[in-house]
Structure formats: C-alpha cells, structure tokens
C-alpha cells in the first residue's frame, strides 16, 4: 500500500496556507509537560523524602506537607561521602575518555563501506556483553586479586571501559552512518591528513551523537554497582556502593537512603543537562545542512 | 553486468567474452577499495578497541569456562575437583533454571518493546518546539540517571507499597481497595519499573536520530501537502529505524544482565515468579557459593544469547546493508 | 574566532586531564599505602554500627597513629563480600562483622583467629561478661572466635492501648509465655473489632534470614524440625506442616497486606504508624520503636511479651552481630585493639553519654543490664525481657525432638544459606496465595532431601 506524495511543482505565487504553530501553548506541549512530570514524579518524591524524618517517609496517607529537616543529609555526609564521590568521578571520567579514544576510531572504521568483517566485529563487540557478570565475578575476582588490583580504582576504570565500549561503538557507528557516504570515503582516502579531515569535517556533524554516547557511558559507569561492590573495599569505593551502605537490615532507612540517592544523582543530572545542550546545538547543525 | 551470455555467437566470440569477463573480475579484485594495504588502513582504527576488548573480556571468559568444569563450593574447603560436564547436566535438569529463563525472555521482550514504543512517542512529542522544552527533556531523562538500586526502592517503598504506597492511596481516592501489587503481579511490577528507567534511554537515542535528520525533505513534503502521518511513515520512520533498532539491541543486551530491580523489589519471589537468570545465578553463587554451578549457568546463558542474537542481528544487518545500498 | 575557541577548548581539556590524573592520587589508587597502623573494617549497615563509625574518632584520639578505614554495606552484600574474601584467604579486611551463623563453621575451617587469647591479655575486657548463650554460640572448642557487638532474641511487641480498646487482657505474671493460639485469637479480635488494619505483623519476605527467622521459631515450638538425627529431611512432617499452616493462615486472616514482601523494615513502619497491633520480631526493634525522635507518639504505649510458644518454652531466636579477625589479616593486633574498644564496657558508656542511652547496643553484655543505671531507667519495659530472652535461648537444643544441627532460627550448616532461601521462596509463594502450603512444603522437602543426603554420605 503506497501513498504517493504529490510532487507538484511548488509555485511561489500562492504560499501554502499553514496552520500557524503557536510556539508557546500548543496542546502537544501540555501533553509533553504532563508526561515529563509523570516520569519525574517518583524522583521528585524521593528528593522530598530526603528532607523528612524516617517516621514521615512512608505513611498512609502520604505526607505532602511536613516539617523539613536536614538530618538525613547530615547523616549522609557524616559517613564520609567525599572519597566515594571522588572515586566515582575518576572511574567514570577516565573510563568514558578511554571509551571515546578507543571507540570513535573503531566506529569510524566500521562505518565505511562494509567489509565482510564489519558484521563479525560488531557481533564480537556485542557478544562480550552476553556473559552475565554474576557468573563471571569469581573469575574476575581471582584475576584482579592476582594482579594486585583489588580495591584499586584502576581495575574499575578498565572494566567500565570494557563494559561501555561495545555500546559506544554501536551507537557512534549509527551516527557516523548518518554522514553522507562520500564524505566518509573522501576522509578515509585522504592519507596524511586523515585525522584533520575527520576532525574538521566529520566530527562536528556527529558531535550530538558523540555527546549522547558519552552521556550514556557516563550514566552506566556512574551507576554500576555489582563490579564495584565486589572488587573494591575501602579505598576505591564508589557512590553506588556508598549508597547501599545506608540500607540497614534492622532499622528504618528510607529517608536517609533518599538523601544519599539524591546526592549520588546530582553529578549525573548536571552531566545530563550539559550534554543536552550539545544535543540541542546539534539541531541547528542538522537544519543548516 | 552481463553474465555469460546464453545466446553465444561464434565460439571465438564466446572465448573473447570469457576472457574479458575474467579480466574484469581480476581488475575488480584489485579495486582501490579492497586492496590489501587499503583494507588494513581501513581496519586500522578498529584495532586498538578490538585488542583491548579481547584482552579484557576473553581471559575472564576462559576462566569461567574452566570453573564451570569444577565442582567447587567456596565455603566447603577441599571440595574443589574436576567434574567435566556434570554442572551442565545439572543445569539442564534444573527445572527452575528453565522457568527463570522464561521469565528472563518475557522481561526483556516486554521491557524493550514497550520502552522503545514509549520512547518513540515521547521523542516525537519533544521534537516540536514548546515553552520549556529543555526542562521537560531534563525531567524525562532523570529516571535513567537514578542509581538502579534507588530507583527500584522508590517503586517498592513509595509507590507500590500495599499499605503506604502512593498508587494505592490514589486508588483509594476513587474507591478501589488496596492491591498487593508486588505480591500479585511481581514480574509485571518489575517490568514497569524497568520500563520507567529505560524509556528515557530509548527516547534519548531516537531524539538524537531525529536531530540529525535533514529537515528539508520534511519541509518539501509539507509544502506539497502531505499529512503529518504520511510524512512520519514515509520519511521519519525509515530514518529512525536504525536508531530504534539500535536502542532495541543495546537495551536487550543490557537488560540480560538486569539484577538490581529484582533484588530490591521482590527478591525473585514469590517462589521464583519474578526471578531472572542473573538473579538466579547470583543466588547460586552468593548463597550457595557453588561457583562451578554458577559458572556453568553463565556459559549456558552466553550460548543461548548468542544463538538468539545471531538471528536477530542477521535481520538487522540485512536491513542495514540494504539501506546503505539504497543510499 | 574559531581558532580561539578551539584553543580554549584544548586548554580546558588539558586542565581537566591534569586534574583527573591528580585525583588518581587521591582516589583509591590501590592499597599500596597500607601502613602497619591501618585497620580495615567491614561492617553491616545497621544503626548501631553506624553509631560506632561515628564514634570511631574517639578511638583514633585515644590511639594516635592508628588509622581506621570502614566499609559498611547492607546485610546481604556485606555477608557475600566478607564470605568471598575470607573463604579465598584474602587479606583485604582486618576486622569482619559476622554472626553466630558463620563463626562456628569458619572457626572449624580455620579461617578466623582465636580471640580468647587476645581477650585474656586485655585487662578489663571481661570475656565472661558476655551473655553465656551468646558466648557459647560464638565459640569453638572452648575459645571465642568472634566477640559480640550486639545480640538479639525475638519477642512479641504489642500496643497496650489497642489491646485495651479491644478488651484483651494479658496475664501479668512474670513467668508468663503466651501461646501462639492465644496470639492468633488476639489478632482475630483486633481485626474483628477494627481496632487496627492488621492484628499482627509477621515477616513474609523470601530470604533465609527474613521470613525463616520467625517461622523457624514457630516450627521449633510446634515440635517440628528440619532434619532428624539421621539427616532425613522433615519438612513435610505433620508438625512442620502444622506450624507453617498456622503461620500462613494467621497472616491471611489477621496479618498485614502484602506480607510476601514484608520484612523487618516494613513491619517496623506499620507498627510505628499504628497500622498493626502486634509484631513478633527481633528484640533489637526497640532501637527503632522506642526512639522518641522517630516515634514520639509511641512512648509508653508498647508492651512486650516473651516469644509465644506451643510445646517448647523459650522459643525466641538467638542472633548476634560479632566482630572477628580473618586468618590472613594484615594487622591483627590493630584489629584486636579496635575490636576490644568497640565491644568493651566503656564503649557502652560512651554511646550512652554521647548519643543517648536508647542507642546503647543491646543484648551483648550482662553488665549493660546490671551496671548501667541510666540504661536501666529508660529500658524498664523491655530491658529485662531482652536479657531474659537471650539468656534462655537454646541454640544447642532448639527443638523438641533431637536434631543433628545447632541454631534456633537457622540450621548451622553452610548449605543453609541456599537451602533456606529456596525454602523461604516457596513459603513466600504460599503466603502470597500463589501455592498451597502443602505444595510449597513438598517442594521444600525435595530441596532439603538433597542437602540431607550429602550429610548422610559423610
């Protein structure tokens, strides 16, 4: 069933009557706001709970009005949030940089006219994520321990890089494929100035894609829990591990955990906001084309 | 491109054609695009990533394979011995393993499809300009930013709690009695939580795809009087298909490993109704401390995922390469 | 303009990169700097342990040169991590927090250091002050291999005002131990008279330390057991079935909604909010319920009774979070210094003075209940009963009929973590109404038979 889009010669004598798009109060805008608030609500509730006493945290009916307190945040800071934050920042930033350094060239190579091996390489990258980490944790523990890297942040850096690299390669390849084929081919044949032509011509075109990829790698690395809890102890503890330390077995922890989770999410939210701006800028690039 | 012509002229002509055909084929194989050196130069940038991945992932995998042939209980010292494929036999005979595998499939398929659909719809919503669009985009991304552990607990404790949860409170306002959501619908509730966390991911991907789409075609189409739906189906959707498929593939592979939501919300219960493979393996590894079993289960998961993935990816690659030729 | 921007970009990147590399030094770049005087401690994240972390600066002041490093995780994570590290002979930790479940097994396997020697050489430590039942549960061949930080048994907590409203009278005799049938009747009455949403809150969450803790005590007192002395599994015996049926039916008739995912935290919340009239659980729940800051309305309204019984008296459980030193610890002497501080009589006084007497770690030392007048004053309603419950617990003889294992609310074998969890998952399904109790116990019996067989072959 094909619907032909009529390709009449667009004459300029009568400009097509188009519904004036009201930028401010379109009904779809309102729907978007509702959806946004709906998705955000649980997070908002968590942040609110961070300011409550434990006894107000989970009540029937839910307490929308309460006397706020900073006790929970004090408790979170009391236990030494600094090192965990630092470790998380280091592991996340370092692994994301490595992922980009390794992944951008790889994605570029895989986006050129497909060689037989392209799908094999892509499949291999994906296959590395098929072994559940829970099954491989003991071998990993033994290897890391024998390398003397237990409780060392570099172990996490390497593992997070390997965790995110396949995703990054797949994602960035898709964005490279958006670039007109001739540009890619021209760049690859450029020889000596290969990198310059890539950097000056191609990278700006794919930068929203790279920003999206980097953001996703940051999120995955920042929130990774299982490897961190098993391979670190006191020196290389990351934020998710620190957070779980607030889950008490015999006690009430919902409010203090909300406070810890809020603190843990702040840096990533900042990253998300920043990366979004890059995405928006990419919009104007696309239109100019 | 003519194949050997059926209507042969004289034998001499046929011979000439055959030779010309062979020469053409040789020239093609020496084409600048596929010369040896050229091939290596093209693949060059791929090598660092490839070598890195092989080094970091294959060694643990080999270890896992080795451990899967041992009977090794960590808390029973001296119990470590070689048993060949016994662990695999035990896995095949473990009926719970297979029912949990079924849960895993339902979980992955359900979450990926629904969150991809929602992500698409929301991305389309966000593609239009309206007041405060940047704010809404940030709001929508936040579920994906929250640590999965905290996200799961938010849902379990504040929303789905049968006594003090917000959902039951809202329902009570319209007269519906309290429902034990997690007790009655454990797997569905886990899926809801995962969809909540993963829709932003899908949305982000599709949005990135939308922003890189050339607008002039859309403008031309609109000028020519095509409806919004026609534009969507003929122009937008094919362009987005790559990104939707990307999201599906990445989401599925990532969700194979999902663990925190189940651990925090239901502990796999009641029974094993909401357990998935990583959770089940975790219990064997960290409660039973049966390392050999856990390793064998992991290898079985890899085998099955590879089989399913190779079928799925073959489909996707067909569409990928098809598109490239059309482009 | 473009070149300027790109130079700035490049500068920014360089600065960021340098900054990153520098943080590598501050970040956890390895335990290369582990000095002689560092003590690495792995704790479980309950409030009593968090308090200890807060007060640890006092220890560091009193012991200059010793640096303490903590890691604190939720119970499941902590247990998994500590077990993996200790079982592999790792030297990651100097002090580990374990319980009376692991201690005898690990002591037998030679994974822990003998602490009685250390204790004897520490004046004023007074090993004999530990409550005898606890001390025995952490000993192997007469020596202690971990020392208790706090201990607990189980008892029944109830709202005195709700009982009054429902017209329920409780026997005031000091030696009175209610029966489970009485308790079930009370719960029904509360529900019938609509005094509260739930008559009683009982755990139902899957986990060998979750639903099985209270349920095992019920099984024990009904006359059931996990294995007979020939290691034949007994989970489908009439006594066990009766006990489990009773537990599940009580929840269904007068228990809380959503019981199959209810653990300690959820019941504490319900009881604190007044949504249940009774709660059978750990004696350490008083740290949550009797804290005026969290539940000011509850002060003085909570009554306490010993764990309900049927056939076997003194059916409360016995559990302790204790501190031990793994064999391969790098700094055992520093470890003992810290352990002896954290479990000493002086520490109790320190907590009372600095953080409030309600936060004193309960149930480890007899002197807490006899030599601390301030603590006695605030714990009048639950203190003596706590001490009594712990003292009278019988982990060596937990059941009516003889058994080949020790442990009240668990079976003290390494396989129990897995077996118990699998069985608890079945029971949780029964509580959620997804299976009948009979079907659940048949499946549970199969699991137990596998374990029993491996012991019969020994």
Image (spheres, coloured by chain):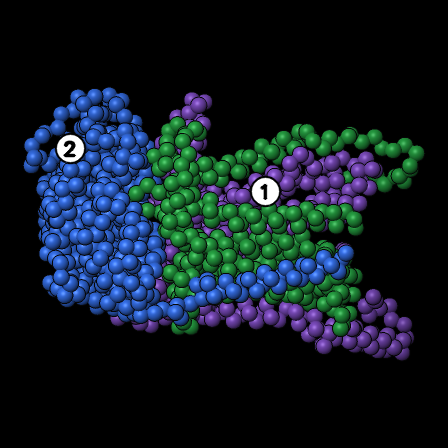
Chain colours: A green, B purple, C blue
Compared to residue B61, the image places residue C217 above or below, namely: above
Residue B257, given in percent of the width and then of the height, sits at 47, 54
In the image, taking residue A146 as reference, residue C206 lies left or right, namely left
Residue C414, given in percent of the width and then of the height, sits at 24, 59
Residue C191, given in percent of the width and then of the height, sits at 25, 25
Marks 2, 1: nearer the viewer: 1
The answer to whether residue A120 shows anywhere in this view is: no
Q: Which residue position is annotated with label 1? A: B138
The one nearer the camera, B142 or A76, is A76
> Dot 2: what SS?
helix
> Dot 1: what SS?
helix
Residue at x-position 39% and y-position 69%: C33
In the image, taking residue A184 as reference, residue A237 lies left or right, namely left
Query: Is the residue under label 1 in contact with that under label 2 (CB below 8 Å)?
Result: no
The one nearer the camera, C45 or B167, is C45
Residue C39, given in percent of the width and then of the height, sits at 30, 63
Q: Residue C181 carries which label?
A: 2
In the image, taking residue C409 as reference, residue A151 lies left or right, namely right
């Amino acid at each position: 069933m094909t619907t032909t889009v009529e390709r009449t010669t667009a004459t300029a004598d009568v400009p097509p009557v188009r519904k004036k798009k009201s930028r401010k109060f379109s009904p779809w805008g309102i729907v978007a706001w509702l959806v946004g608030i709906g998705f955000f609500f649980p997070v908002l509730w968590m942040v609110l709970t961070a300011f409550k006493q434990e006894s107000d945290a989970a009540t029937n009916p839910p307490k929308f009005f309460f006397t706020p307190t900073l006790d929970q945040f004090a408790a979170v800071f009391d236990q030494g949030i600094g090192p965990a934050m630092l470790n998380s920042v280091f592991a996340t930033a370092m692994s994301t940089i490595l992922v980009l350094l390794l992944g951008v060239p790889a994605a570029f190579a895989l986006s050129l006219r497909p060689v037989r091996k392209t799908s094999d390489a892509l499949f291999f990258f994906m296959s590395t994520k098929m072994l559940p980490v829970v099954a491989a944790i003991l071998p990993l523990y033994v290897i890391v321990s024998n390398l003397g890297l237990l409780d060392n942040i570099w172990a996490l850096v390497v593992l997070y890089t390997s965790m995110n690299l396949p995703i990054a390669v797949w994602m960035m390849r898709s964005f490279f494929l958006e670039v007109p084929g001739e540009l890619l081919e021209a760049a690859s044949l450029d020889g000596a100035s290969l990198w310059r032509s890539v950097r000056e011509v191609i990278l700006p075109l794919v930068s929203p894609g790279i920003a999206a990829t980097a953001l996703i790698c940051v999120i995955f690395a920042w929130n990774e829990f299982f490897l961190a809890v098993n391979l670190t102890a006191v020196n290389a503890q990351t934020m998710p591990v620190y957070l779980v330390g607030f889950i008490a077995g015999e006690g009430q922890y919902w409010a203090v955990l909300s406070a810890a989770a809020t603190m843990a999410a702040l840096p990533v939210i900042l990253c998300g906001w920043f990366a979004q701006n890059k995405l928006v800028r990419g919009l104007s690039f696309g239109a100019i084309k | 491109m003519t194949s050997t012509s059926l209507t042969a002229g004289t034998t001499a002509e046929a011979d000439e054609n055959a030779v010309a055909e062979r020469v053409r084929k040789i020239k093609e194989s020496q084409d600048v695009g596929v010369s040896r050196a050229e091939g290596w130069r093209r693949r060059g940038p791929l090598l660092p990533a490839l070598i890195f991945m092989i080094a970091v992932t294959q060694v643990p995998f080999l270890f896992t394979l080795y451990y899967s042939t041992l009977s090794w209980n960590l808390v029973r010292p001296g119990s470590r011995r070689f048993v060949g494929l016994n662990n695999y036999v035990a896995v095949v005979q473990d009926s719970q393993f297979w029912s949990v595998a079924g849960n895993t499939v339902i979980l992955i398929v359900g979450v990926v499809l629904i969150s991809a659909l929602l992500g698409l719809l929301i991305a389309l919503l966000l593609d239009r300009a309206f007041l405060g669009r940047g704010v809404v985009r940030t709001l929508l991304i936040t579920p994906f930013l929250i640590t999965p552990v905290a996200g799961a607990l938010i849902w379990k404790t504040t929303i789905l709690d049968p006594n003090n949860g917000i959902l039951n409170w809202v329902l009570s306002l319209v007269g519906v009695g309290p429902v034990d959501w997690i007790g009655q619908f454990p797997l569905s509730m886990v899926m809801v939580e995962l969809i909540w966390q993963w829709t932003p991911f899908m949305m982000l991907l599709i949005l990135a795809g939308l922003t890189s789409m050339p607008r002039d075609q859309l403008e031309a189409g609109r000028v020519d009087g095509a409806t919004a739906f026609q534009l969507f189906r003929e122009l937008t959707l094919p362009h987005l298909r790559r990104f939707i498929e990307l999201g599906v593939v990445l989401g599925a592979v990532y969700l194979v490993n999902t663990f925190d939501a189940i651990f925090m919300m239901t502990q796999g219960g009641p029974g094993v109704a909401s357990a998935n493979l990583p959770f089940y393996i975790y219990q064997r590894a960290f409660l039973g401390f049966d390392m050999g079993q856990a390793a064998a289960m992991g290898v079985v998961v890899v085998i099955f995922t590879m089989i399913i993935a190779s079928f799925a990816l073959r489909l996707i690659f067909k569409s990928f390469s098809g598109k490239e030729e059309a482009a | 303009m473009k070149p300027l921007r790109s130079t700035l970009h490049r500068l920014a990147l360089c600065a960021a990169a340098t900054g990153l590399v520098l943080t590598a030094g501050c970040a956890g770049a390895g335990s290369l700097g582990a000095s002689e005087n560092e003590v690495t401690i792995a704790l479980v994240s309950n409030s009593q342990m968090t308090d200890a972390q807060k007060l640890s600066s006092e220890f560091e002041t009193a012991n200059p040169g010793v640096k303490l490093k903590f890691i604190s995780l939720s119970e499941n994570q902590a247990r998994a991590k500590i077990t993996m590290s200790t079982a592999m002979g790792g030297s990651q930790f100097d002090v580990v927090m374990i319980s009376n479940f692991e201690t005898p097994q690990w002591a037998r396997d030679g994974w822990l250091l003998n602490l009685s020697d250390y204790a004897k050489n520490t004046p004023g430590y007074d090993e004999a002050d530990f409550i005898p039942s606890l001390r025995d549960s952490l000993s192997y061949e007469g020596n202690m291999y971990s020392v208790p930080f706090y201990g607990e048994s189980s008892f029944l907590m109830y709202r005195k005002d709700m009982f009054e409203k429902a017209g329920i009278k409780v026997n005031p005799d000091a030696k009175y131990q209610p029966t489970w049938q009485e308790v079930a009747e009370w719960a029904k009455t509360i529900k019938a008279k609509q005094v509260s949403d739930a008559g009683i809150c009982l755990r139902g969450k899957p986990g060998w330390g979750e639903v099985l803790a209270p349920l095992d005590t019920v099984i024990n007192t009904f006359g059931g057991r996990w294995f007979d002395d020939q290691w034949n599994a007994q989970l489908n015996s009439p006594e066990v079935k009766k006990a489990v049926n009773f537990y599940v039916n009580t929840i269904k008739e007068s228990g809380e909604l959503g019981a199959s995912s209810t653990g300690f935290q959820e019941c504490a919340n319900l009881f604190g909010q007044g949504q249940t009239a009774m709660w059978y659980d750990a004696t350490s729940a008083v740290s949550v319920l009797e804290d005026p800051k969290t539940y000011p309305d509850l002060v003085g309204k909570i009554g306490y009774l010993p764990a309900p019984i049927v056939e076997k008296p003194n059916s409360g459980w016995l559990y302790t979070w204790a501190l031990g030193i793994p064999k391969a610890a790098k700094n055992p002497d520093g470890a003992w210094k810290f352990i002896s501080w954290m479990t000493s009589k002086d520490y109790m006084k320190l907590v009372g003075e600095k953080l409030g007497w309600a936060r004193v770690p309960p149930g480890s030392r007899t002197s807490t209940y006899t030599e601390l007048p301030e603590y006695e004053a605030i714990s009048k309603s639950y203190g003596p009963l706590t001490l009594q419950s712990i003292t009278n617990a019988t982990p060596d003889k937990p059941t009516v009929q003889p058994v080949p294992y020790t442990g009240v609310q668990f079976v003290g074998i390494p396989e129990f973590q897995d077996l118990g969890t699998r069985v608890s998952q079945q029971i949780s399904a029964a509580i959620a109404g997804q299976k009948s109790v009979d079907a659940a116990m048949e499946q549970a019996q199969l699991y137990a038979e596998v374990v029993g067989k491996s012991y019969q072959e020994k």
